[in-house]
Image: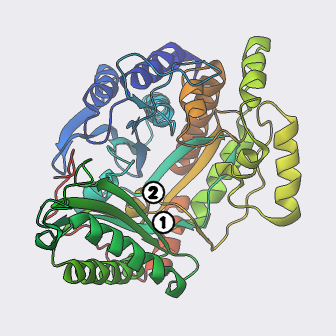
Amino acid sequence: MEKYKEILEELNSCIWDYSELKFEEFKSSEKIKEILKKYDFKVESNLAEMETAFTATYGSGKPIIGILAEYDALSGLSQEANALTPIPRKNISTGHGCGHNLVGTATVGACLKIKDYLVNSKKSGTIVLIGCPAEEGGSGKAYLAREGVFDNLDIALTWHPAGGNAVLTGSLQANCQAYFRFKGISSHAAGAPHLGRSALDAVELMNVGVNYMREHIEPTDRIHYAVTDTGGISPNVVQNHAEVLYLIRSTTTEKVNKLYERVCKVAKGASLMTETEVEIIFDKACSNIISNNILEEILYESMLETPLPNYTDEELKFASNMKNTILDTDIESDLSLMLVSGNTKKDLVKKYKECLMSNIILEHKHLEINLPGSSDVGDCSHVVPTAQFVAACFVPGTPAHSWQMVSQGKSGIAVKGMIYASEVLTKTALKIINNPEIVKKAKDEFLAITGGIKYQCPIPKEIKPKKKKF
């Protein structure tokens, strides 16, 4: 990857600086497209009614390999780069607290290297970088899947930064998100309370009702909420408007839909009790992940064959100082350790505590498990055989969506982990190009799991991608 190192370092830095939110990644997507156009990739923009979604394609013939790029940031995570304490950037409220600057950059590097191979070898094969907006709270890949963007792919690959190196297996949860907006009647809370009908009361009653539901849901279900509008700050005014946002998760879309119906009933009940009106606004959803053992094994081989990064004394000093900000409980929750338990996890946690940067690749074993959390990669995986891995870009245990993760995003340790990930993606794609049997086996496994049932998008057709909530 040395040939493209400077380009990738600059790209990563730019995307980190831009820190653009879901569906608004205009500068980030343009920067990626600009680079790929320069290297003769054919770019198609404005996909699935998302201005920042695109494909960049090079090559011809089979196999057609999709590499999934992400580049959206998070709100409320403004943070100076390479700082060891929380220091917000001036006039910036956002930050890359999940490392999507690294995700998007590594996929560009892989596509450029794969293109070089196709040119030099004259092999049949097509590489497609798919620019996927709004992984954070927007389910951009679900909209892409709904519009058939993944339909022509043979294989899809992606990755995510973490504190360790591992192939991901099993599934993540399906989810859906909706706003519940209540409308009441305002009045003077002391002079004429009998004339008021409190929308905030309705929100509170809804939350209480849903909390009582928790005794009667499956252990793998999750229901989260945030009050997004309290109806004002004057306690002597009965609030005539209030709103709460719910995120509902379960192991499959079907189970999510049933939970959603129950939550909607609770909202309507709260509306009846308070004599208010409720408007339910469906926001977004994503599917659970269908993992693919065949592709996981190829990714694992590629990870083992790719040398792990070496770090300079300066980089290790930075890692040591950053490690002092991270708790032992954070280390136990590192993304790379989600797939292990018992004594294996204890041993790995001990190693993570002792090292400054992970210098191991976790042994891979395909598992049929469901992990907490969600990703819109799931929607791609319901269309085409898909696999992903995590690579060490941060000090082990760096909490996701934290100032520490934002701070490390442009550091030398993060860039070296990103380069490693890019090499792994490249090696995996080349193995697939040179061995068509891999595609056949991966597709056979995919068909065995899905039973040939076509993908159904969990987002209703009438719901469009939304930059804002309404």
Q: Position of residue 141 (x, y in %)?
A: 33, 54
Image quarter hosting the N terminus: top right
Amino acid of disc 2: Ser
Q: Residue tagged by mark 1? A: 289
Residue 436 location (% of width, % of height): 51, 57
Rendered location of residue 158, percent (x, y): 49, 47
The correct choice, above or below, for 188 with respect to 97 in the image is below
- For marks 1 and 2, the one nearer the N-term is 1
Say which quarter of the image contains residue 154: bottom left
Above or below residue 333? Residue 430 is above
The answer to whether the residue labelled 1 contacts the one labelled 2, judged by CB atoms less than 8 Å apart, is yes
Q: Spot the residue most to the front.
A: 191
Per the rendering, the mark at residue 375 is 2
Q: Is residue 195 left or right of residue 205?
A: left
* Residue 325 against residue 328 in the figure, above or below: above
Q: Secondary structure at mark 2?
A: loop
Q: Is residue 415 visible?
A: yes
Residue in the foreground of this view, choosing between 123 and 89: 89
Total residue callouts: 2
Q: Is residue 337 left or right of residue 388?
A: right
Q: Residue at x 30, y 53 (%)?
A: 228
Q: What mark, if any, has residue 37 been given in the picture? A: none
Residue density around tag 1, few if under 14, some if 14–19, many if 20 or more, within 10 Å: many
